[in-house]
Image (cartoon, rainbow, N blue to C red):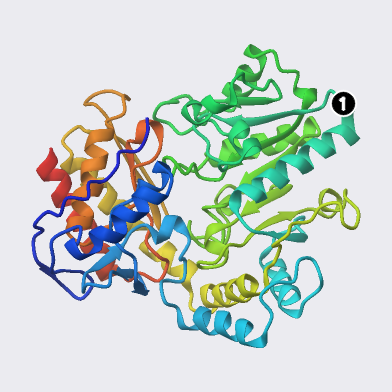
Amino acid sequence: MATKEFPLAPETAPLVKTPYRCIQTAIPVPESLPLLERLRDMEPRSMGGQPPILWHHGEGACISDPYGNTWIDFSSGVLVTASGHGRPEIVEAICGMAHQGLYHAYCFPSEIRARLVEEIEQWLPAPLRRVFLLTTGSEATECCIKLARTYGLQAGGPKKNILVTFDNAFHGRTMGAQLAGGAAGLKGWLGEPDPHFVQVPFPEGFRQKDVRFEVFEASLQAQGVDPDRVCGVMSETFQGCNAALMPAEYAQQLRAWCGLHKAVLIFDEVQAAFGRSGRAFGFQHLGVVPDLAACGKGISGGMPLSAVLGTESLMNMYGPGEMTSTHSANPVCAAAALANLNVIRKKGLIENAARLDPVLRQGAEAIAHAAKGRVGAWNAVGLVAAIQFTRPGSTTPDPDTAWNVAHRAYQRGVMLFAPVGVGGCAIKLCPPLVINEEALREGLEVLCEITAELA
């Protein structure tokens, strides 16, 4: 289902004034309409899917427009601004590198790149050892696919070329990432399915109620896949569409299966890494370490930078100049990322996400209860939750209710991005990791009130 376009007709919104929210105009703001209309006239329709609010500046867990309105940000700009908006350390790092006169370096060595790689390396559990800096999460997952396929050719010959991923998975919007993705609606433009990309059920316990690892093996068998032809298995640590962690026992059996069949285990940590789940990496909840991990979003706090983390052998399969990227470790982005990771570590933001985990869980549960049967499932870990709106008593998506929650939320001072997941039925709650308990509870109470009204 395509995301609905938020209307540009201003509506009178309830006046709001708290320490974290302020709504004092009609929404969208009438004065903003000329610019919003110009954007819709000039850009592709795909860019019109988010609330029509002009983002102007932010501080901590709040985002503001130029007209005096402020929202509790439950989006983190799609899980990016981990250490908050307007973070002074990141601003200083960006300005400092720009004033140094270095804002591009390609793959030529730079001190800031070395410092960032060294910082990231200190976060890594063995056997993860090497760090490859890129620009986007899609580029990172594409690189993981490339490395797994290359390994398969070297380890098992030309027939060891099947990558296994999961239903409803999202790994990005580039071609390889969408071949690996598990959402059929995103693959229509690809035409015929590629037999080298195979999906199996994700053990999330709602639409796929049987969470035993035997389902993985049975699904491969049903699709005629020889396990020894599998070059790699890639999964989000928690699925972005539903915030459901892979069960630990399942992950441990998958780790053993990949070892037995000489397949690369890849975790897509683009959303999860660097504290979002209340651990440094999402896979630390599962008791396993992958061979490769794709990271992005929260790694930089706001600038376009991503990373592939991998073992010595996998990351060294390509020689000098054979695996590069034009904007790899852009100096300004690298400076921002280094500052961001230092803030996360020194200010205890991972610990804050873990501490607030039960508060977010309780809030998500209260929203589900207020929906009076219109929420089929909800999941939460650390500072990310997803609430799936469904037709009562079923798994059928209810995208209209999810969209209405998001619509009313930004009118009342809580910023969500457009509903995601199966049929666009899930609202995601993912505030910056700097949010305090008072602001988190306030935002959750607003969403609970809205859901009760719609129910």
The quadrant of the rendering that contains the C terminus is top left
Q: Which amino acid type corresponds to the residue marked 1 in the rendered image?
A: Pro
For residue 37, above or below residue 204: below
Q: Give the image location of residue 327, x and y in percent.
A: 69, 62
Q: Quadrant of residue 421?
A: top left
The one of 29 and 360 positioned closer to us in this rendering: 29
Q: From the top left corner, tell me how far across and down residue 309 is, in percent.
A: 71, 56
Q: Tell me where residue 236 sits by quadrant.
A: top right
Q: Nearer the viewer, residue 129 or 143?
A: 143
The residue nearer to you, when weighing 65 against 121, is 65
Q: In screen coordinates, is 405 left or right of 45? A: left
Count every numbered label the image shows and give the total: 1
**Which residue is at 91% across, 53% downward?**
319
Q: Is residue 405 above or below residue 114?
A: above
Q: Mark 1 points at which residue?
A: 158
Position in image of residue 248 (x %, y %):
56, 42
**Crowdedness near tag 1: few (<14), some (14–19) or many (≥20) residues, C-alpha within 10 Å:** few
Give x and y (percent) for residue 357: 38, 58
Q: What element carries label 1?
A: loop
Report whether 108 appears left or right of 213. Answer: right
Residue found 54% across the figure and 30% down from its top: 182
Q: Residue visible at 81% across and 34% down?
A: 262
| Residue at (79% x, 31% y) in the render | 260
Q: Does 405 sit left or right of 341 as displayed? A: left
Residue 390, by quadrant, is top left
Q: In this view, does 350 lie to the left or right of 195?
A: left
Report if residue 382 is visible in the image: no
